[in-house]
Amino acid sequence: MATKALPGGTFTMGESLTVTRMGYGAMQLAGPHVFGPPADRDAAVAVLREVVELGITHIDTSDYYGPYVTNEIIKEALHPYPGSLRIVTKVGALRDAEGGWPTALAPEQLRQAVRDNLDRLGLDALDVVNLRVGAFDAPTPGSIAEPFAVLAELREDGLIKELGLSTVTAEQVAEAQTIAPVVCVQNYYNLAHRVDDELLDSLAAQGIAYVPYFPLGGFSPLQSEELSAVAGRLGATPMSVALAWLLQRSPNILLIPGTSSVAHLRENVTGAALTLPEVELAVLNAIAG
């Protein structure tokens, strides 16, 4: 597998977890609204196998996608896992019968979530576990010391290799770092939503990965006249330009765009390889200004 051909090269999280900066987010492998099984399970398995075939070594998931569905499909498609593959999961929420996302930050809930991820993925230790503590698309201020300390204990027990955070403030990152090392932060960020610019740059200076979720706008795809104009001048799609902009924004950004389509997966990889000229970068940088 020619991983060197992937856009952005690689990034090392923590001491030794090297991943391709072009990753894959598995959320869309579940059913509509990330709830229930997919309409075509074989297609979901095919997407994951294509992820590995393309040389991508970073898959982002969670046991509450489905719930359970996504991790079960990952195991079916890829276990036993290639030695280079890193699976990043997250805890801190559940799914209720109506498809809601209630928080689950009590110590025993977190311990159970880690056990569930291990069991359904078929692993003895999880590469990275992100503690999800904020709302759907924005952090919730307040101390995260208690739940993060629970995950730090599980790391000491050998069930988790590295720890990360999701939907957090800079203050929460700093608090967590007094408890255990943080190797990545996964927050809502894209070309048009850039409230995390300062945090992103701070993490880059510390060698910590920043993983934007909804890199293409999420359930409401990015819409911008400037973005479309740049894409037109470059003969590319707006989504390709948006992914390429993220990779060029900072070397610590790791991409995890999601799709349930092999063709779309290939398009994302090819599109992210686009090199944006400085003049076009200036236009794009002004979108969120």
Image (spheres, rainbow, N blue to C red):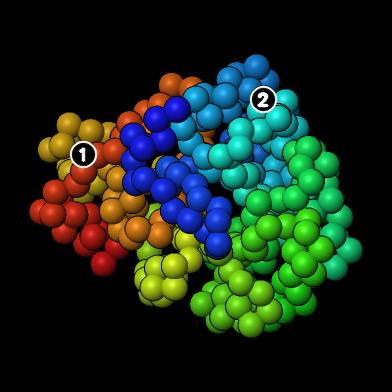
Is 262 on the left-hand or right-hand side of 95?
Answer: left
Q: Distance between the residues labelled 1 and 2?
A: 35 Å
- Residue farthest along the right direction in this orientation: 108
Quarter of the picture containing the N terminus is top left
Q: Residue at x 68, y 79 (%)?
A: 179
Is 76 on the left-hand or right-hand side of 128?
Answer: right
The residue nearer to you, when weighing 44 against 3, is 3
Q: Tell me residue 213's x, y (percent).
A: 50, 52
Q: For residue 185, which quarter of the picture?
A: bottom right
Q: For residue 273, which quarter of the picture?
A: top left
Mark 1 lies on a secondary structure that is: helix
Disc 2 marks a residue whose amino acid type is Ala
Q: Residue at x 28, y 53 (%)?
A: 248
Placement of 78 over or under 197, stated as above or below: above
Is 246 on the left-hand or right-hand side of 41?
Answer: left
Q: Which residue was labeled with disc 1?
A: 231
Is 69 on the left-hand or right-hand side of 12?
Answer: right
Q: Tell me residue 194's x, y (percent).
A: 38, 64
Q: Is residue 241 among what the camera can see?
A: yes
Q: How many numbered markers are drawn?
A: 2
Q: Which residue was labeled with disc 2?
A: 77
Q: Which mark is residue 278?
A: none
Q: Is residue 238 among what the camera can see?
A: no
Q: Tell me residue 178's x, y (percent).
A: 64, 82
Q: Tell me residue 59's x, y (percent).
A: 57, 41
Q: Residue at x 61, y 72 (%)?
A: 181
